[in-house]
């Protein structure tokens, strides 16, 4: 075995360290789960779940964000060919706007897990806890750079979403979706200001309405002021302003959604401060009945 081959094998072994621990505990079928598309202003959110074989040797898999588009495109069919099982789930605009993006991402993950043709004993999840599943799971912050199965899932999710955004670019070429993939780049912001939103845009996102000039000045002021909120008490005071009649019913609904997500972020930061080592090592959640 050459030194290069040894280095590649060591990398693969390190990226399956948690799976080996779980296998020793009798959990032999482990699925990696990840999503793509939480931050963009347009397009679907996509999740993937992947179960890799024991002797998986496909080199070059990493967090999809670190890979070139050509590398992801090349890995996409190879992962599917070698995986014991994989599933990809797409949650589109109507559900995103109905649920909010946070819950839409969780729904995509759950659907991907449920669509696997084999039932995992355990899930390794990038930064989240998949709701309403029976198997135990480990939440790993930055898991797509730590565990091979999560990295494989991230490649499937991102490549699928990129292809969907290229399709949307064919339908709505004036927005440049093929280039920015729906993220709020300067080009995208300018297109929204010029053309307004299209059916691919997430109208539940205040930023979409802001860039398109559809939100009131008071809405923008309240939305921006939320960044200064640092505690539950301050958030309670901020919420009182939602009764102002300068806000439309739709704006109030969107601001309530922002407040809820902000409340979750405050709670997550507090949890992280209380147990910083846990985020690195992963957190074990058992949802077995």
Image (spheres, helix red, strand yellow):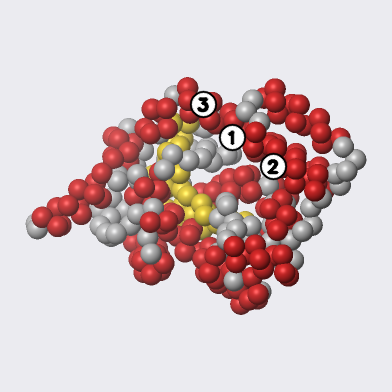
The residue at the point 65 percent across, 75 percent down is: 174
The residue mark sitting in front, 2 or 3, is 2
Mark 3 packing: few (<14 Cα in 10 Å), some, or many (20+)? few
For the C terminus, the quadrant is top right
Residue 145 picture location, percent across and down: 36, 47
Structural distance between the alpha carbons of marks 3 and 1: 10 Å
The residue at the point 34 percent across, 61 percent down is: 82
Q: Residue under circle 1? A: 265
Q: For residue 271, which numbered disc appears in the image?
A: 3
Residue 117 picture location, percent across and down: 47, 55
Residue 288 picture location, percent across and down: 51, 32
Question: Where, by quadrant of the figure, is residue 22 drawn?
Answer: top left
Q: If you read the primary sequence from the N terminus, does the residue marked by circle 3 or circle 1 appear first?
A: 1
Mark 2 packing: few (<14 Cα in 10 Å), some, or many (20+)? few
Structural distance between the alpha carbons of marks 2 and 3: 25 Å
Question: Where, by quadrant of the figure, is residue 30 drawn?
Answer: top left
Residue 249 picture location, percent across and down: 86, 45
């Amino acid at each position: 075995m050459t030194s290069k081959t040894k280095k590649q094998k060591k990398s693969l072994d390190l990226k399956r360290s948690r799976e080996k621990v779980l296998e020793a505990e009798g959990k032999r079928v482990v699925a990696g789960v990840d999503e793509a598309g939480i931050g963009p202003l347009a397009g679907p959110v996509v999740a993937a779940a992947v179960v890799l074989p024991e002797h998986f040797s496909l080199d070059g898999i990493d967090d999809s964000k670190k890979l070139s588009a050509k590398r992801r495109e090349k890995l996409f069919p190879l992962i599917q060919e070698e995986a014991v099982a994989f599933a990809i789930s797409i949650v589109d605009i109507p559900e995103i706007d109905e649920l909010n993006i946070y819950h839409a991402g969780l729904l995509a993950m759950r659907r991907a897990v449920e669509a696997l043709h084999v039932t995992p004993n355990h899930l390794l999840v990038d930064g989240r806890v998949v709701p309403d599943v029976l198997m135990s799971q480990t939440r790993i912050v930055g898991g797509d750079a730590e565990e091979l199965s999560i990295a494989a899932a991230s490649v499937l999710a991102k490549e699928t979403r990129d292809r969907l955004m290229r399709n949307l670019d064919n339908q709505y070429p004036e927005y440049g979706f093929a280039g920015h993939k729906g993220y709020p780049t300067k080009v995208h912001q300018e297109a929204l200001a010029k053309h307004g939103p299209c059916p691919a845009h997430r109208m539940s996102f205040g930023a979409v309405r802001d860039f398109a000039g559809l939100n009131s000045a008071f809405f923008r002021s309240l939305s921006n002021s939320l960044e200064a909120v640092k505690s539950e008490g301050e958030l309670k005071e901020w919420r009182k302003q939602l009764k102002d009649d300068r806000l439309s019913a739709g704006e109030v609904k969107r601001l309530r959604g922002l407040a809820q997500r902000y409340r979750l972020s405050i709670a997550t930061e507090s949890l992280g401060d209380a147990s910083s080592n846990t985020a690195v090592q992963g957190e074990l959640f058992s949802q077995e009945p």
